[in-house]
Image (cartoon, grey):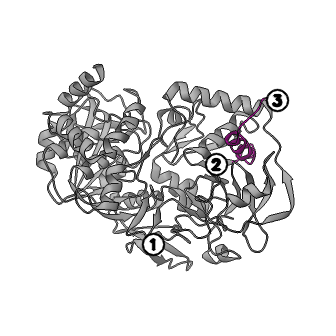
C-alpha cells in the first residue's frame, strides 16, 4: 500500500545517494517538484534515467546530484540545448557526467522489459547507426526461430521511479490521463515508486480501461499541486512555454544557474514556497 | 500570387510529398509544420502519429514539444510511448517517416548526436530520439532541413539514423525493413537518391535558385540529375494555409513551432 506522505518525507525515505532514479513523464506530467526536493536534500552520485532529460535533469546535473545519465533525447523542447547537460558532458562541470545513450524505441522497450521482470529487451533497431559503437550495452541477439539478428538492450530497473499524475484517492490509487509516455512502465519497473499528484479525491471516477496504478504497487503518494510545472498536467494547467524559454539564459551561465538554485530551490522550504517565490518574482 | 520566402517554399514543397490518407510518423519542428500543412491543404485524411503517443492528431496550432496537450486532445487515440514504437512503427504500419536533422550526408544518413569526437565533443546535439528506428522501419522517409555547408556535409562525425549507409545496396545488406529516404527537401531544392548508387542528387530546383547556389551550400560535390525540374512556386491557398497556421501558433505559444 502506498503511504500518503509529504514529498520531503518520501524523498528522505525512498531516494538514497547512489540510487538509479527515473523521473519520467514524456513532456507531460514531468515531476519537477520531486527533482527540486532531491536537490534540497543534496542527494549525490545518482544514476539518472529519462528518455528526455528536459529541465528536471538539467537542474539535477547542474546541482551536482548526478554521476551518470541514461537518456535518448537531450534538448530543451522548442528552445534548444540543455546547457547544464552540455556543460557537464563537454567541460565536466560541476563534475564529470558519464552518459549512456540510447534511442527512444530502445529506452521505451527497456522500460517495458523492466516492468515485465525481464533482464533485457529485444527490438528491431539501430541498423546502420553508430550508437552501438559508443554504447557497449547495445548488443544483438539472434532469433531462435527465424535467424533474424535483433537489438538487445538491458532492461531499465530503477531503484526508485518518480512520476506525477492528475489524482489519487485516499487509499493511494493513482489515475493518469492524457499523454502517458512510459510512466506506467517506469513505475512498475522500479523497486520503489513515488507519485506526486495534483489532488487527492474521494473517488477517482476512472473510466473503464483508464490508466490506474493500484496503491499496492506504489510506495508513496504525495499531494503537490502544480508539481509538474513548467510542463503541464492535462486538465489542470498548460505548459509554461515562457519558463522553458526563460530557462535558457539561466542555465547557459554557471553563475546565473547557481544563483538561481540557491535562491529558488535551496532557498525555499518546499515546492509551495518555491511557487510563491516564483510568483512574487514574476509580479515584480 | 503573393511573394514568399525560401522557408515557405521548403515547407510547401515538403508538404506536397505527403499523400492523402498516408500514415505519417512526424518529428517535431519542420516535419510537424509540413505534415500539418499537408493535412490542412491537399491531404485532409493524412494520419499523423507523434512519438509521445497520439495517433491521428489534428492540432490547430503547431506543437512546441512532441507531447503538447492539443496533440492528445485532437487525436483518434492516445497510446503509451512504448506502444507507438512497438506496435505501430516496428509493427510495420507507418507509410512515411518525416524527419529533420542537424546534418545529412550524400547517402541520406542523419547526424543529430554530436559534432566532433563523441567522447570529446565540439558540440553536443540532443541525440537520437525516435529517429533511428523511424529511419529503419517506416516504409519510406522524407527529410527536411535548411541547406548549408555546415548541414550538408561530406562525412558525418556520427551516423545517428541511417539512410543508405555507404551507398549502393548497403541499406539492403543491413536488412532494414523500410525503403529508406526518398527525398531531402531544402530551402533551395529537392534531392532524391540516384538509382543504383543511392547518392542524393538534385532533381528539382526551387524557383529563382541557381545551380551555383546549391553547389555553394553543399559540403560534398553535389550532382544534378539529367532532368532537373523546376519546383512549382507556392500556390496562394498553400501560402494562406501555412501563414494562418503560423499565426495561430504564434498567438497560442508566443513563439513559432518547436524544433527538435
Q: Residue A246: give its label.
A: none
Query: In the picture shown, does residue A251 fall above or below A238?
Result: below
Residue B193: in sight, yes or no? yes
Q: What residue lies at 21% left-to-right and 26% top-to-bottom?
A: A277
Q: Residue B1: give its label.
A: 3
Q: How many angstroms separate mark 2 from mark 3 (CA)?
A: 30 Å
Which residue is denoted by mark 2 in the rendering?
B24
Query: In the picture shown, does residue B212 fall above or below A225?
Result: below
Q: Which x, y percent locates residue B124? A: 42, 59
Task: Name the image quarter holding residue A20.
Answer: bottom left
- Compare residues B79 and A271 and report the one nearer the observer: A271
Apparent side of residue A257 relative to residue A27 in the rendered image (left or right): left
Q: How many angstroms separate mark 3 from mark 1 (CA)?
A: 50 Å
Which element is circle 1 on?
Answer: helix
Which is closer to the viewer, label 3 or label 1? Answer: 3
What residue range appears in magenta?
Answer: B1-22
Are discs 2 and 1 less than 8 Å apart at CB? no
Going from N to C along the chain, the mark reached first, 2 or 3, is 3
Amino acid at each position: 500500500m502506498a503511504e500518503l506522505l509529504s514529498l520531503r518525507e518520501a524523498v528522505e525515505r525512498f531516494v538514497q545517494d547512489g540510487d538509479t532514479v527515473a523521473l519520467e513523464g514524456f513532456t507531460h506530467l514531468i515531476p519537477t517538484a520531486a527533482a527540486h526536493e532531491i536537490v534540497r536534500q543534496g542527494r549525490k552520485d545518482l544514476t539518472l534515467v529519462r528518455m528526455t532529460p528536459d529541465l528536471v535533469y538539467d537542474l539535477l546535473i547542474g546541482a551536482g546530484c548526478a554521476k551518470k545519465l541514461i537518456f535518448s533525447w537531450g534538448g530543451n523542447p522548442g528552445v534548444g540545448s540543455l546547457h547544464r547537460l552540455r556543460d557537464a558532458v563537454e567541460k565536466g562541470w560541476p563534475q564529470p557526467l558519464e552518459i549512456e545513450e540510447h534511442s527512444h524505441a530502445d529506452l521505451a522497450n527497456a522500460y517495458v522489459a523492466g516492468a515485465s521482470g525481464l533482464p533485457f529487451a529485444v527490438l528491431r533497431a539501430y541498423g546502420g547507426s553508430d550508437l552501438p559503437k559508443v554504447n557497449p550495452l547495445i548488443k544483438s541477439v539472434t532469433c531462435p526461430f527465424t535467424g533474424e539478428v535483433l537489438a538487445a538492450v538491458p532492461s531499465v530497473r530503477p531503484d526508485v521511479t518518480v512520476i506525477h499524475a492528475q489524482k489519487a484517492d485516499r487509499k493511494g490509487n493513482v489515475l493518469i490521463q492524457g499523454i502517458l509516455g512510459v510512466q506506467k512502465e517506469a513505475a512498475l519497473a522500479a523497486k520503489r515508486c513515488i507519485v506526486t499528484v495534483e489532488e487527492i479525491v474521494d473517488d477517482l471516477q476512472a473510466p473503464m480501461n483508464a490508466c490506474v496504478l493500484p496503491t499496492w504497487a506504489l510506495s508513496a503518494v504525495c499531494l503537490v499541486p502544480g508539481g509538474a510545472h513548467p510542463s503541464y498536467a492535462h486538465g489542470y494547467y498548460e505548459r509554461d512555454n515562457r519558463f522553458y524559454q526563460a530557462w535558457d539564459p539561466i542555465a547557459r551561465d554557471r553563475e546565473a544557474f547557481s544563483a538561481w538554485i540557491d535562491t529558488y530551490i535551496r532557498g525555499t522550504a518546499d515546492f509551495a514556497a518555491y511557487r510563491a517565490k516564483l510568483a512574487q518574482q514574476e509580479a515584480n | 500570387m503573393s511573394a514568399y520566402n525560401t522557408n515557405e517554399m521548403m515547407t510547401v514543397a515538403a508538404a506536397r510529398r505527403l499523400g492523402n490518407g498516408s500514415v505519417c510518423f512526424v518529428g517535431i519542428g519542420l516535419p510537424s509544420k509540413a505534415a500539418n500543412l499537408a493535412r490542412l491543404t491537399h491531404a485532409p485524411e493524412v494520419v499523423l502519429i507523434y512519438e509521445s503517443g497520439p495517433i491521428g492528431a489534428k492540432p490547430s496550432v503547431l506543437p512546441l514539444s512532441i507531447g503538447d496537450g492539443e496533440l492528445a486532445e485532437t487525436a483518434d487515440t492516445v497510446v503509451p510511448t512504448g506502444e507507438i514504437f512497438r506496435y505501430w512503427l516496428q509493427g510495420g504500419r507507418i507509410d512515411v517517416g518525416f524527419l529533420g536533422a542537424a546534418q545529412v550526408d550524400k547517402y541520406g544518413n542523419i547526424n543529430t548526436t554530436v559534432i566532433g569526437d563523441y567522447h570529446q565533443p565540439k558540440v553536443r546535439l540532443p541525440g537520437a530520439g525516435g529517429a533511428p528506428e523511424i529511419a529503419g522501419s517506416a516504409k519510406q522517409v522524407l527529410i527536411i532541413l535548411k541547406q548549408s555547408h555546415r548541414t550538408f556535409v561530406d562525412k558525418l562525425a556520427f551516423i545517428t539514423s541511417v539512410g543508405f549507409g555507404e551507398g549502393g545496396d548497403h541499406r539492403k545488406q543491413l536488412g532494414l525493413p523500410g525503403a529508406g529516404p526518398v527525398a531531402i527537401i531544402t530551402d533551395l531544392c529537392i534531392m532524391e537518391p540516384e538509382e543504383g548508387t543511392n547518392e542524393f542528387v538534385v532533381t528539382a530546383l526551387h524557383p529563382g535558385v541557381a545551380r551555383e547556389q546549391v553547389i555553394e551550400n553543399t559540403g560534398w560535390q553535389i550532382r544534378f540529375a539529367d532532368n532537373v525540374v523546376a519546383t512549382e512556386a507556392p500556390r496562394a491557398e498553400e501560402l494562406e494555409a501555412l501563414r494562418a497556421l503560423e499565426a495561430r501558433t504564434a498567438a497560442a505559444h508566443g513563439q513559432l513551432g518547436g524544433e527538435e
